[in-house]
Amino acid sequence: MREEIGSYDAKTKLPEILRRVESGETFTITNRGRPVADLIPSRISGTKKSEVAIENILKAKKHVVSNDDLMNLKASGRR
C-alpha cells in the first residue's frame, strides 16, 4: 500500500522521501487531497546496480594472484 503525502510535505522532505523510495517504499503525492502522482523506485537503478555488481565480480575473477604475492601477503599478515 502506498503512503499518501501532500505536495508541500513532498517538497520540504524530498531528500528523506527519495531515500525511502530508494529502499523500496512507494508514495502517492496529493494536491489538496487529490492524488496527482505516484513515486516509485526506478527499475533502471536496480538494473544498474545489478550491472555494476556483475562487473565487479568479473573484475575480481580476472585478478590473479601469483604464489609469490600470496606468500608475501600471508607473511605480512603475521606481523
Image: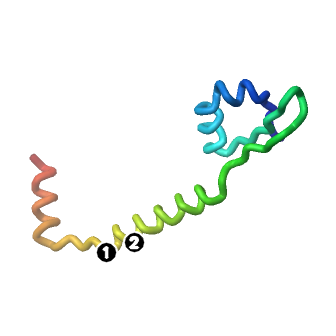
Which quarter of the rendered picture does the N terminus lie within?
A: top right
**Compared to 79, does 9 lie above or below?**
above
| Residue 44, quarter of the rendered image | bottom right
Q: Measured along the vertical axis of the image, is residue 31 above or below residue 2?
A: above
Where residue 10 appears, as percent x and y from the top left, is: 70, 30
Nearer to us in this view, 30 or 59? 30
Q: Image quadrant of residue 32?
A: top right
Residue 50 horizontal side relative to residue 36, left or right: left
> Which quadrant holds residue 43?
bottom right
Would you name the residue on which mark 1 appears?
62
Which is more toward the observer, 56 or 61? Answer: 56
User: Circle 2 sits in a helix, a strand or a loop, which is it?
Assistant: helix
Name the amino acid type tagged 1.
Lys
Question: For this rendering, which residue is in front, 49 or 32?
Answer: 32
Q: Which mark is residue 53?
A: none
Place of residue 9 in the rendered image (x, y in percent of width and height, measured from the top left)? 72, 25
Taking the spot 80% from the left edge, 42% from the top edge, the residue there is: 37
**Which numbered disc covers residue 58?**
2
Secondary structure under the numbered disc 1 in the rendered image: helix
Question: At 61% from the left edge and 44% from the top edge, which residue is drawn?
Answer: 22
Marks 1 and 2 in Cβ contact (< 8 Å): yes
Q: Is residue 77 left or right of residue 20?
A: left
Q: Amino acid at mark 2?
A: Leu
Q: Residues within 10 Å of mark 1 (few under 14, many from 20)?
A: few
Q: Which x, y percent locates residue 59?
A: 35, 69
